[in-house]
Amino acid sequence: MVIEKPVKRIYPMLYFIGIIIVVLGCLQLVPLVVSLIYKERFISSIFLATASFTILVGEGLMAIGYRYRSTKLSFGEGTVVAAGAWLLGTMLCALPYYFSGSCLSFIDSCFDVMSGLTTTGLCLIQDMDHLSNGINMWRQTLTFTGGQGMVVLALTFLTKDQSNAYKMYVGEGKDEKLFPNAVSTARQIWKISIFYLIIGTVVMTFAARSAGLAWDRAFLHGMWVYMSAWSTGGFAPMSQNILYYHSSLFELCAVVFFVIGSLNFALHHAVLSGRVSEIRKNIETITFTISFIILSSLVTVGLMKNNVYPDLLAFLRKGLFHLISGQTTTGFMTVYAKQFYYEWGDIALVAMTIAMLLGGSACSTAGGFKALRIGVIFETFKTEVKKLLLPESRIVEYRIHHIKEMILSDSLIRSSFLIVTAYLVTFTVGTLITLLFGYPLTMAAFESASVTGNVGLSIGVTSTSMPLLLKITYIIMMWLGRLEFMSIFALIAFILKGGLKK
Amino acid sequence: MRIMIIGGGNVGFYLSKTLIASKHKIMIIEENPTHCERLVSNLDSKWVEVFLGDGTEVNCLRDAGIHHADVLIAVTGYDQNNLVACQLAKDYFGVKKTIARVKNPKNIRVFEKLGVDSVISSTESIANVINQELEWNDVNKLIREHSSSLRLREVQVRQAPWLIHHPLKDLGIPKGIIIIAILRRAQAIIPSGETILQEEDKIILWGEEQLISDFLHILSAN
Amino acid sequence: MFLIIAGCTQVGALLVKKFVDTGHNVVVIDRDKGNFDYLETGCNCLMIHGMPIDEDVLKEAGIERADALIAVTAEDNMNIMISQIAKHLYHVPHVMMQANHPERQAVLSAKGLHMICPIALTADHFYTSLLQKENSI
């Protein structure tokens, strides 16, 4: 009698992908409720249909893999689950956009969903100023979920078979352990987010009210802008983005929340459990502050040279606002896209491009290289130089402060360099492809950095009229940037291997 | 006194050598046969008995005669073994006094809480000596700047047991010397004539250098 | 439950696996990095490399908020010391340890330590199951 038969590795993976898809289906109930409240018949019927369809697909996948659910996944397979769920989830989440007619084509819908889930914030959606509340709610729900991570959300519901949890968690570009168990960590991440969601919604509602919106609109807009800010997303309910509100207070509140959102969840956890001094000591906040100071002086010089914003308030609200928005990878805008290109000048645009590539903290909702990696790489360089000056026999440690004192291991240094290189390659390839379609260099670099770093500031390349190939390129770049490459390469390798076997 | 020593490495070896000089009866338990051989061949068998075995085991302790021991000193190289040896001696065999050596100074607190009578850490002693040395040097330097013959000195009361049980005013401390502070546990006490010293106290003397050294001489002579 | 397991021995690794699978927060401490190989790759727990009787290491593992501690290092005395630190200094609600020498059992249960001796258990099991078989024949 044979005791163990070979298990097709795909089955247990399908089970976990199924769970994530079901969760995404349930998420569509949120906009459904909003559209029901506002009596948007057509929209609510679409959400009802797509939600049921998504849940059905998810349940189907779970049923296929159910028998093998306790099979141990390898590290690679765990990451494949994360990447696969993102791919399939994006297509399923695009259905409401497509059927409601908000987007012109299915690719446009996928672009918008990917942009939301990766907290980028570029959009191809049509007639944004007259969007229904249901669709708007769906955009923000996607951003908010994508920021924390759909795998992280699915993990919070996982009660049994948790041994594979950590591998999937890592696959989604996060690796901090707030608690020893990845499921507890995922729950804590959501607790922190919900805690801030409540505070943020209240604050933003009052800010929107003071900007002159009626109470119920102020509440919805406040909540949406907050969700987008916290997730460093960049979707706003109106086509003029944050400019629409014409309120310094509103902009200031948004800045506060997206800066908070760009901080590491481990740091949030430490601060909320009473270790406030971590903010000062943390390598990420230090790296972020230093790089921000350098870049903001560059932007100042660039803008002054062209004399773009002569008065201080305008400079703060337009110049610095965009730099913070760019570096935290949020992508809220207070100017029109083309203004960047025609007014800002090369120096400021290059500084912006660098800021967007650097990005916020690791294990946060932000994108880019992440401050932790910049810090690690900088520390490595510093220690290497120090080594040259010391006697050869002297042993030097690489040490950083991140929540606790850490010794930099070779593997951490290697992975930092690897990921940063991968970002740079993606950025370069993206710029090249954009150039091929005839856009000028500064524009191509700016937009490409914005897409790679999941930022969402646009210089005008992104529009419904841009070539199909470019849209697909950008979708892939956003996906790569959000999941930090490795899990997507694992997915591609997995598909190729499976394809070759048959 | 009959003293049982757990651990016959370097510390155990030199410790027993020193204790023999003051005519104590020693029992050593050591796990390593090579170490045992060194102990046997280098120590006077009239005063020292050597046992091969695990000093954290009940049977071995019993065989080595722990019932007759007044003191147990655990000086193996592992903190956990020293703790267990002391606890067995104290709670299981009723040995009156247990002394343990720890490698990690942080374990002093742990051992004291878990019932070991005295805990010694060479690491901490060295650190203390260094710290004290620095402090006393600073103070004495300051004093020397103002007066060449005045000195501060620290004395352990334990060295002169006759100081205990009487009020300070009856001790006949010579004129020209004053006790400016008593260090008791972690506290510093400013003494009066009625204060009575305890065994674990340290006193800080202040006075002419010559008078102090005479007084110290008297202290050790008594 | 927040659980600390001292000693990533084979027993320790099996314990980690059992508790992780049922969704508990597990921290495992071992002074030998190589022992972490007993765990599966990408284990859903926290691994701390350090001396488990060092209070700093225990604090890093979160002993102040731990609900339970199980000491299963290869050394009995180490286990005894860890258990006592957890029980008497940090008041961890549930503390258990493994003892390899059967004769320690009497001594240590007198100290109020919950301990298990695998050797005694195995021997008892063989003894009783053989006797039962003999009786049934």
Image (cartoon, helix red, strand yellow):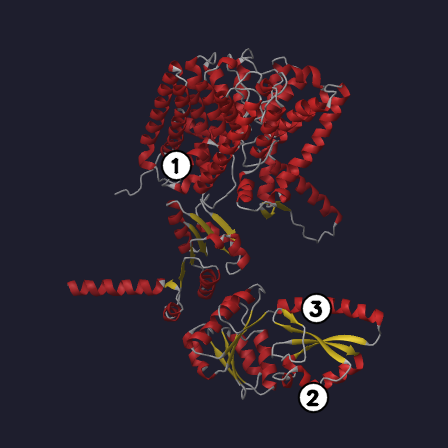
In this view of the protein, which residue sits in the foreground, A169 or A480? A169
The number of callouts visible is 3
Which chain is disc 3 placed on? Answer: B
Residue A218 vertical placement versus A159 (above, below)? above
Left or right of A65? Residue C39 is: right
In the picture of the structure, the residue carrying the numbered disc 3 is: B132
- Tell me the CA gap for discs 3 and 1: 59 Å
Dot 2: element: helix
Point 43% across, 32% down: residue: A81
In the picture of the structure, the residue carrying the numbered disc 2 is: B221
Mark 2: amino acid: Ala
Label 2 near label 3: C-beta < 8 Å?
Answer: no
Q: Can residue B157 be seen at all in this image of the molecule?
A: yes
Q: Can residue A234 be seen at all in this image of the molecule?
A: no
Q: Position of residue C30 (x, y in %)?
A: 49, 55
Label 2 near label 1: C-beta < 8 Å?
Answer: no
Mark 1: amino acid: Phe
